[in-house]
Image (cartoon, helix red, strand yellow):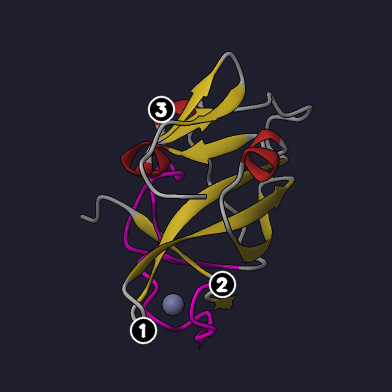
Amino acid sequence: MGSFDFFALALTCPDCGASYTENAPTNMQTKIQNHMYLAMLAVGTKLDIYYPITDCGYALVNPPVKKDSFTLIDAWECVNCSGYQWALITVEDSVLTGGQAVKLSCEIINNVNYLSDDANDIGWQIVSGKAVYEGSERL
Ligand SMILES: [Zn+2]
């Protein structure tokens, strides 16, 4: 009886350069599936997506053209520098097709469909479909 799954992606930390394979512990939790069971969701996995995705811990930035094909930004942890990091994930026809580490910025957030609610913790808000940074860290 898990309460979430994990995205399992090969990621390189943009802060310290540490790289992780899809089997590494990046603690990238997601509640995007109907039945969560601590599954490792790797590139190529067909997702059993729960709709609306806004009930899965993601804020809507831009409505996707097709509901099962979208991009989202989610949080992960770099154990090397203990940093909160972010990844841009792509889903096409419900299949996880890619993921890469990104730094959050208005530009990158404004181009995705969904943003993890975890971004609220460091000061990002979506206001009228646009990214607004209200945090204290220098961007
Ligand atoms: Zn790092």
Instruction: Using the image as rendered, state which of residue 110 and residue 41 is in the foreground.
Output: 110
Does 84 appear above or below 15?
above
Residue 114 on image: x %, y %: 58, 36
Whether the magenta-drawn stretch holds residue 17 is answered as yes
Disc 1 marks a residue whose amino acid type is Asn
Residue 63 placement, left or right of 128: right
Element type at mark 3: helix
| Circle number at residue 133 | none
Q: CA distance from mark 1 to mark 3?
A: 32 Å
Q: CA distance from mark 2 to mark 3?
A: 29 Å
Q: Residue at x 70, y 40 (%)?
A: 107
Q: Is mark 1 within 8 Å of ligand 1?
A: yes
The mark closer to the camera, 1 or 3, is 1
Element type at mark 1: loop
| Circle number at residue 14 | 2
Which residue is tagged 1? 80
Disc 2 marks a residue whose amino acid type is Pro
Which residue is tagged 3? 55
Residue 89 on image: x %, y %: 63, 55
Number of numbered callouts drawn: 3
Instruction: Using the image as rendered, state which of residue 16 and residue 87 is in the foreground.
Output: 16
Region in magenta: 14-42
